[in-house]
Amino acid sequence: MGNDMDQFVNLSITEMPALRKFRSIGNFALSALTAALLLGCTSSSHQVAMPEIVGTSASFRHAEPTPNLSPGFDATWWQFFADPALAELVARALANNHDVRIAVQRVAQARAGSTAAASRLAPTVAISGSASDQRTTLGEEFKRGTPDTRAYRAALDLGWEIDVFGAARAGANAAELDALAAQAGVQATRLAVASEMARQVTLHRSAQLRLHKLKALHASYIKTESITRRQQTEGVVSQLDVARAAGDTRALSANIPQLEMLVATTEHQIAVLLGQNPGNPVAELHRGAEVTLPTVPALQPGQPADLLLRRPDILAAEKQWLAEGARLREAQADTWPKLFVSGVLGGEDLSLNLLNTGPARYSSLALAFSMPLFNAGRLQANVERQTARERAATLQWEQSTLKALQDVENSLVSLSKERVRNVALQAMLDQRGLALQRVQSLAREGQIGQLPVQEAHRGLMSAELAVLESRTDLALSGIQLYRALGGGWEVQTGAPQQPSQAIPNTPNTTTTSALTQGQPR
């Protein structure tokens, strides 16, 4: 049996009468296949064009002129803040964040779907086999009508839907575009995680710095209240002044728990971004290093049209639009005839009543077509539905572009105006410092008491808090601008930095192993 099957497998096609008989059908199928390939190559496809809403402006409306800078994309924009702890936290988040890992799995799903859709363009080949043994105890005269049989069969089955009108090719193209959109979704998630980590770290450090300043200011209020009470016993001030001083102290102390809560909740959020239990301390936040706010470097936002190539959410919307267009072509092609080719090539070994007939070969080749005639409007309704989906995807692409432009313009305005505000607050801080020096000088000369000195000191610390809050908003605006631009930019070396206000951080014995950053393929 084995030798017979070897002969069957090595048999040339030209030796099979059945295949020679259907050679003309095969030639026709080959011609149809060639026409299908040519049709697939010349079929119309969407051309990616810039939405008219982007315009042709060379710059953003609220971009500040920075002639010394040249735009250049850098995916690791957080490195520009020159903050090793922040860079380490972002790297850990990108490697372990669950949102990023979920997005990567969506890419794997989309790629598997793309492979499955592309398989429609190729023929299917299967091998089949069977063995049967049928016997009876009836006499020889009965076995003539129902003989004992033993049969062994093996065959190769071929099936192929020739994509004459491009339905399968359009479906494969749509699935491939879905995979590209999912990959852009990974980049969008990574950008969101990186910017959110930078934002939470900034809020956490700002809360620590403000808490430190607020506690020092609270101590000054307590001292002022103590001086006021002593002066009241001396008859210098009234009980009303004491009540006012005590009320100011209590009002200020009420803000301390709120900042302590913000320190804790931002650390919890950072832990979740890192993919770890929020009940465990984040090691990078408890290393005893000084606490400083990230410094926003000068940057050039480039042209509005650059967003189409850089913002991952716009790229994902564009791929979805192209995918819906491909599905529309698939739906249109489904209204046309379909061409099928099938073939079988096999062999069998048959024996009747212990009489071996020897190995035999068999083959068949068939060409068939199917054309829809009546389906109660189902195919046309599918075309209309897909047309609406394509139009909706076009509007979604334009809407994503509009929101991206809005994000950049808002971030530019926020950053620009906050810089102006920061300069004004810094000037106020300088004046408060000069006022304190003058009051202290008068107190040393004995011209005034300690109460004006404490009031001037309180005014200085209040100004320091205002400047600190402005620097926090400045850093948050810069982070938002980087996110709105879809990445990072080449920064100006030696750019002036904002004055930092630092306090020592408390050490913590908790350690966390460094994890390598995962880059989705």
Image (cartoon, rainbow, N blue to C red):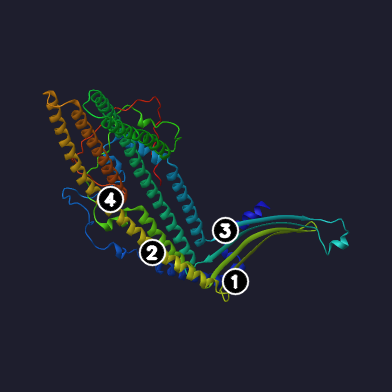
Query: Does 302 sit above or below residue 79?
Result: below
Tell me where residue 451 appears, x and y as whole percent. 20, 28
Q: CA distance from mark 1 to mark 3?
A: 22 Å
Say few, some or many: other residues with alpha carbon within 10 Å of mark 4 (under 14 / 14 to 19 / 20 or more).
many
Q: CA distance from mark 2 to mark 1?
A: 56 Å
Query: Does 515 sit above or below residue 323?
Result: above
| Residue, disc 4 | 411
Tell me where residue 498 appears, x and y as whole percent. 21, 38
Which numbered disc flags the more N-terminal residue, 4 or 1?
1
| Residue, disc 1 | 21
- Which residue is more in the foreground, 174 or 412? 412
Determine the secondary structure under disc 1: helix
Count the numbered circles shown.
4
Which numbered disc flags the more N-terminal residue, 4 or 2?
2
* Quadrant of the image occupied by residue 220: top left
Q: CA distance from mark 3 to mark 4?
A: 58 Å
Which numbered disc flags the more N-terminal residue, 2 or 1?
1
- Mark nearer the viewer, 4 or 2: 4
Q: Residue at x 15, y 36 (%)?
A: 431
Which numbered disc flags the more N-terminal residue, 2 or 3?
3
Determine the secondary structure under disc 2: helix
Tell me where residue 16 appears, x and y as whole percent. 61, 65
Does the residue at mark 1 contact the one at mark 3 (Cβ under 8 Å)? no
Tell me where residue 361 appears, x and y as whole percent. 65, 62
- Mark nearer the viewer, 3 or 4: 4
Tag 2: amino acid: Leu
Which label is found at residue 461?
none
Q: Residue at x 19, y 39 (%)?
A: 426
- Which residue is more in the foreground, 497 or 30? 497
| Residue, disc 3 | 125
Which numbered disc flags the more N-terminal residue, 3 or 4?
3
